[in-house]
C-alpha cells in the first residue's frame, strides 16, 4: 500500500475520530442571574439601549420608564443589564396587592396587552411641557384607549390646524389651552373655532393657569404657593429666579421643568381643575359614534 504522508500528521484513520467526543468537557453556557422586576428597579434593555425604571409587571411583560417620562414595554427574561451586568428579569415573587391596579390618573389599569391601535381622533395641547405632563399622568389611559396627544407650539394657529385636520364625527379633536379665562386671547381663539364650520366636532377646554407648570400643586413642590411674577417679566424666567434656579438659557428652563415634572407621580399632585379638563377631552374623543 502506498505510504500516506498525511497519516504521520493525523493518524492512520484521520476521519474516524469523533469530533464531539469531548463535548461534555466544554464550558457550559453561563446561567444569567435572575432578578425580580420590582418597582423602581433601573435596568437597560440591551437590544434598544432603552434605560428606565420598572413601573409595572403584568403577565410576561415589564414596563420601563426613562428619565424623560417615556415608557416602553418589553418581555420578561434575558436581554437586560443591571449596573452593567447581564441579568434575567423575572416576575416579582411578592404577592400582588388586593384590589385592581390603578394608573397614575387613578383609573383601573388595563392589562398591558390591551393597548389599542391609534384612533383617528386627536388631543392637542399647547406645548411640549403640556404633552409631557399629560403623558406622565394619563399615558396608560391614553394608550389603552388608542388616543394620540400632539402639541401645537402655541394656540395662535389653532384655527388653521383645525381646518387642515377637517374633523368629523368619527375624527374629533380635543384641545387643552393654557390661561383660558374670559377676555383673554386664548378665549377669543377658542370661540372662533367653536363658531367655525368644524365647531361641532371640536372641543376646546382650558385651565386658568398662566402656564401648565402652575397645574402642579404647591404641596407637590414643597412650597406654600406659586410665586407671583410681576407684569413685564417672562413668567417662566420669573419663576426660576424666584426659586433661585438658573434661567438665562432655554436649557435652564428645560431643566427647571424636568425638576418640577419629577415631583409629579399621580393625579393627586395636580390641581383638580386640570384633572377635570383632561378627563373631559378623553371622554369627548372616545365617545362612541
Image (cartoon, rainbow, N blue to C red):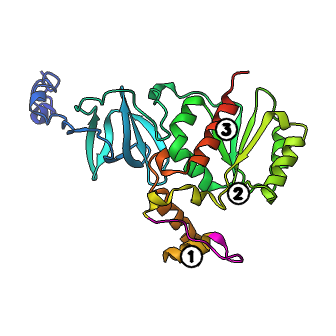
Instruction: Residue at 19% x, 36% y: name it.
Output: 31
Q: Main secondary structure of the magenta part?
A: loop
Position above or below: 166 against 185: above
Instruction: Residue at 71% x, 33% y: name it.
Output: 121
Residue for badge 2: 179
Q: Which label number is shown at residue 247?
A: 1
Residue for badge 3: 281
Q: Mark 2 packing: few (<14 Cα in 10 Å), some, or many (20+)?
A: some
Label 1 – label 3 distance at C-alpha = 33 Å
Q: Position of residue 21 (x, y in %)?
A: 10, 25
Instruction: Residue at 69% x, 22% y: name it.
Output: 288
Front residue of this view, candidates 9 and 52: 52
Label 2 – label 3 distance at C-alpha = 17 Å
Q: Position of residue 255 (x, y in %)?
A: 51, 66
Left/right placement of residue 191 relative to residue 42 reads right
Which quarter of the picture shows residue 193?
Answer: top right
Q: Position of residue 12 (x, y in %)?
A: 9, 26
As helix, strand or loop, the secondary structure at mark 2 comes to loop
Front residue of this view, candidates 180 and 17: 180
As helix, strand or loop, the secondary structure at mark 1 comes to loop
Q: Earlier in the sequence, mark 1 or mark 3?
A: 1
Start-end of magenta stretch = 223-235
Check the picture and name the quadrant holding the C terminus.
top right
Amino acid at each position: 500500500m502506498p505510504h500516506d504522508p498525511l497519516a504521520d500528521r493525523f493518524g492512520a484513520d484521520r476521519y474516524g475520530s469523533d469530533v464531539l467526543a469531548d463535548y461534555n468537557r466544554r464550558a457550559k453556557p453561563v446561567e444569567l442571574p435572575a432578578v425580580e422586576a420590582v418597582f423602581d428597579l433601573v435596568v437597560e434593555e440591551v437590544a434598544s439601549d432603552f434605560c428606565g425604571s420598572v413601573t409595572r409587571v403584568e403577565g410576561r411583560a415589564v414596563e420601563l420608564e426613562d428619565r424623560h417620562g417615556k415608557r416602553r414595554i418589553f418581555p420578561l427574561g434575558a436581554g437586560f443589564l443591571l449596573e452593567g451586568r447581564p441579568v434575567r428579569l423575572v416576575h416579582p415573587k411578592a404577592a400582588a396587592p388586593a384590589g385592581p391596579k390603578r394608573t397614575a390618573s387613578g383609573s383601573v389599569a388595563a392589562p398591558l396587552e390591551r393597548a389599542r391601535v391609534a384612533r383617528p381622533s386627536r388631543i392637542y395641547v399647547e406645548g411640549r411641557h403640556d404633552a409631557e405632563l399629560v403623558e406622565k399622568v394619563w399615558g396608560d389611559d391614553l394608550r389603552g384607549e388608542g388616543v394620540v396627544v400632539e402639541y401645537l407650539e402655541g394656540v395662535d394657529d389653532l384655527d388653521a390646524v383645525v381646518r387642515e385636520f377637517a374633523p368629523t364625527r368619527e375624527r374629533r379633536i380635543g384641545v387643552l389651552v393654557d390661561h383660558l379665562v374670559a377676555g383673554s386671547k386664548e378665549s377669543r381663539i377658542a370661540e372662533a373655532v367653536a363658531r367655525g364650520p368644524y365647531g361641532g366636532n371640536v372641543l376646546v377646554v382650558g385651565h386658568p393657569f398662566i402656564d401648565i407648570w402652575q397645574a402642579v400643586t404647591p404641596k407637590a413642590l414643597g412650597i406654600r404657593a406659586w410665586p407671583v411674577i410681576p407684569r413685564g417679566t417672562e413668567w417662566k424666567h420669573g419663576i426660576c429666579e424666584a426659586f433661585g434656579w438658573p434661567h438665562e438659557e432655554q436649557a435652564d428652563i428645560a431643566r427647571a421643568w424636568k425638576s418640577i415634572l419629577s415631583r409629579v407621580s399621580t393625579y393627586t399632585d395636580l390641581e383638580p381643575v386640570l384633572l377635570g379638563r383632561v378627563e373631559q377631552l378623553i371622554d369627548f374623543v372616545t365617545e362612541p359614534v
